[in-house]
Amino acid sequence: MAACDVVVVGSYPPAPGPATAAVLAAVRRAWDSGWSVRVVSYRSGAADQVVPVAGPLAGWRLEQIRRHYAGPSRLVLVLQAGAPFCDMGLAQQVATAAGLVWGLRQYEDSTVVVGEDPGILPLCMRIVAGAATHVVAPTQAIADRLAKHYGLASGSVSVEEGGEGYPAAPHGVEPSTWGLFRPGAAGSVQVVDMPPTTLAQRVRARAMSSSSLLTRRLRGR
């Protein structure tokens, strides 16, 4: 069991975008505070773990992460488009928010970082923000916009700058072609198990297997 002081949950390289920049900034701030850090990503990448912290089970996933890392007291959860709110239906959003409230409160200190506007219902944002110890935005302009758009209390969103230098997207690649890194794209992906050998190798192996079985039967074994 890999114990740590703080867990940061959000997109991580090579996934591009402002949410990844926010995660990197959160990791640097934790390091500067002298804490040991573990990173859990929504999508495959360089993070320690990949956990689908999304949908109505998002809160339970946060608790599973806490148990896996020996009960750290601090959590940083980065909100972005498509995660943890992966379904924009009213019932699904409310269920996700309710689950996150429970999950956030399992930690003594929880920070919600809005890496990019998640586009959720204002009610859900207020529910999640109310359960967190801190709500953070990367710039004052974004903090003011979040407070106005989601009806958060004035001054409730603090500013912690950082994360500059990470690309918004790979050079020459449009957001619509980000593939698995594009929020919601995984729903249309079909996973196919491909054989690790060539057709000729599989035919030869099957022939040898059949020959061996026939030989054993002829010998009465």
Image (cartoon, rainbow, N blue to C red):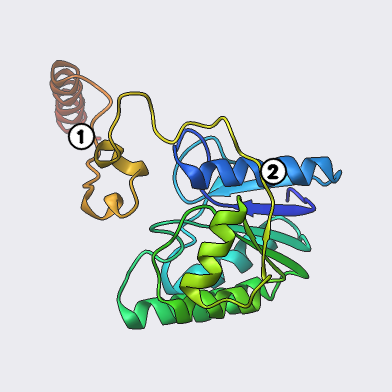
Q: Nearer the viewer, residue 128 or 149?
A: 149
Answer left or right for 50 relative to 34.
Answer: left
User: x, y (%) of residue 108?
Assistant: 78, 70
Amino acid at the residue labelled 1: Gly
Which of the pair 41/200 is nearer the observer? 41
Residue 132, quarter of picture: bottom right
Q: Is residue 189 above or below residue 14?
A: below
Q: Is residue 71 visible?
A: no
Q: Residue at x 74, y 54 (%)?
A: 6
At x 19%, y 17%, the residue is 201
Observer-nearest residue: 32 or 60? 32
Q: Are marks 1 and 2 in contact (CB under 8 Å)?
A: no
Indicate left or right for 165 with 111 as reference: left
Q: Residue furthest right?
A: 34
In this orientation, which residue lies closer to the viewer: 16 or 159? Answer: 159
Q: Read off the residue under disc 1.
A: 220
Residue 131 at least partly seen: yes
Q: Is residue 140 left or right of residue 124?
A: right
The C terminus lies in which quarter of the figure? top left
- Residue 211: x and y in percent read 15, 23
- Occupied quadrant, residue 90: bottom left
Q: Secondary structure at mark 1?
A: loop
Q: Give me the disc on residue 27.
A: 2
Q: CA distance from mark 1 to mark 2?
A: 66 Å
Q: Position of residue 171 (x, y in %)?
A: 36, 24
| Residue 2 in the image: above or below residue 68 | above
Q: Secondary structure at mark 2?
A: helix
User: Which of marks 2 and 1 precedes in the sequence?
Assistant: 2
Q: Is residue 166 left or right of residue 31?
A: left
On residue 172, the disc is: none
**Which of the 4 quarters of the picture holds residue 191?**
top left
**Numbered disc in front, either 1 or 2:** 2
